Image (spheres, grey):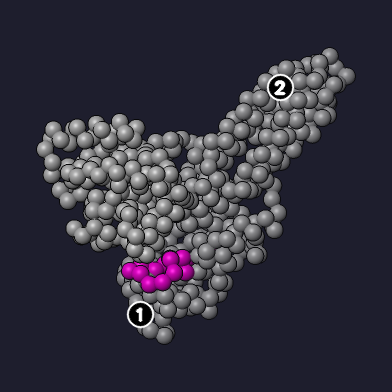
Amino acid sequence: MGFSTSDTIVAVSSAPGSGDRGIVRLSGSEAVQIASLLFHGDEFCDLESIPGFTRLVGLIELKECGSVPAECYLFRGPASYTRQDLVELHTVGAAPLLAMIAEAAIARGARSAEAGEFTARAFLTGAMDLTEAEAVATVINARSDAELRAAQKLKEGRLAQRGAAVAEELTTLTSLVEADIDFSEEPIDFISPQEIRARLHVLVTGLRDLLDRTDAVERLSSIPSVMLVGPPNAGKSSLMNALTGLDRAICSAVAGTTRDVLSAPLALDGGEVRLLDSAGHDADPGLVSALARHRMIHVAQQVEAICLVVDLSSVQEERTDHLINAINRSIALVVANKVDLPSQRVCSEVIKKLSATYGCRVVSVSATEDIGLQDLRDELSALLFENTPIDDDVVLALTARHRGHLDQCCRAIQRAEFVASEAKNTIDCADLLAVDLREALDALGQLTGRVTTEDLLGRIFSSFCIGK
């Protein structure tokens, strides 16, 4: 892709397909002028004389289909996403209509934007660094709550801030080491090897901690799965429907209604999970039942947690034990369903026995009467997300590129730390120290985009969608 910022670009910026609202975005020195040829405000004002951060209501005039209602959002550079004049035309979200508006803008002097070119301009004009620009794509493509939170923190500049703090300390140390070289003939000791080593150790410890505690984008994008298992007619399907609010599973008093593994999204306080409902495990010799058991056991080996659902009014220990042996996995949580049916005394006795048998928490619920469902949601959230530091600054959506440059920086700092530990005086190792410190600074520069190449930028922004 080209990286010129002098021309005016246009693209459809709303999601592909039809919707209630669609957006056509322009950026560049002629963005306002071109928009004024298409959009006419209800108050008959001159668009080119309007200040930034202004919303206007009016019409877009097109030869092909006449006038369509629209809104114009005008942003003046440098107080805009791209630090250039930027205009967004909002109208009916019909894909053919949006394409006609973009083509009309091109006919009046704009150029069709390439993938990621709006964000590339934001980077090239200094509105954001490279880590923040990459975070835009991660936010757009986030597939889980955890990935979205981590990407938002990256977009807010958390990684850039950490990198800037390390770079500032490395720059200070480099200047002191190079001062020792410049004034080697003078009896001046700007900094001792011991102090250099101590300060470098603090830096590398912080960076390694960041790498060790921060998930990669690939892991953050995965949504944890929890599977409901249990004997037939324990109420797994009713429980799944009650928790998710979806009639995903067919509920019936006839045992064995569910034959396949069903899936539905479940929103918890800690994030989104995938709730799976499996076929009830029994000893039916029929082919369909055997296939259902095989499928259930196979999926049970891959999920993050297993929840055993039992009918509190009729606990069948033999069938339950046979099920646990078949899936060969520990139970994370026992759900004692139909708590509304037996007496309170019977409930307490059975729950104590279940807890002792499986060594885990037992949550009593009634899927049909909405009893204990919030407690179950809280238990599932704690089970799947309690070790995830949601509000911790170190949870960032790091890409392989980020991790590579951070690791390169760490290795350079560790080499400098070793050199300093072997020297009695700074001047004895100043040249080697300066080389390693400069390499560490260069790695940080590549991380944030201060040091980069057009090929690297092309690969990064080509992964964006058009209009972003």
Foreground: 377 or 403? 377
In the picture as drawn, the residue positioned furthest to the top comes out as: 187
Quadrant (top left/top right/bottom left/bottom right) for the N terminus: bottom right
Dot 2: within a 10 Å radius of its alpha carbon, few (fewer than 14), some, or many (20 or more) residues? many
Find out whether residue 43 is within the magenta segment: no
Residue 292 drawn at (x, y percent): 37, 60
Which amino acid type is marked by label 2? Arg
Q: Residue at x 56, y 52 (%)?
A: 134
How far apart are labels 1 and 2 at the CA level?
Answer: 70 Å
Horizontally, is 279 left or right of 395 in the view? left
Tell me the crowding category of disc 1: few under 14, some 14 to 19, or many 20 or more residues within 10 angstroms, Cα based: some
Is 271 situated left or right of 448 in this image? Answer: left
Q: Find residue 259 and report its horizontal and vertical position in percent.
A: 32, 61
Magenta range is 12-32
Q: Residue furthest right?
A: 185
Does residue 31 show up magenta in the picture?
A: yes
Task: Give the percent coordinates (x, y) of residue 298.
Answer: 44, 54
First of labels 1, 2 by sequence position: 1
Question: Which residue is painted at 23% across and 35% down in the image?
Answer: 351
Residue drawn 42% across and 75% down?
95
Pick out the residue farthest to the left: 343
Say which residue label 1 marks.
67
Q: What amino acid is at disc 1?
A: Ser
Question: What residue lies at 75% left-to-right and 30% top-to-bottom?
Answer: 415
Q: Nearer the viewer, mark 1 or mark 2?
A: 2
Look at mark 2 in the image and give the residue it sits on.
197
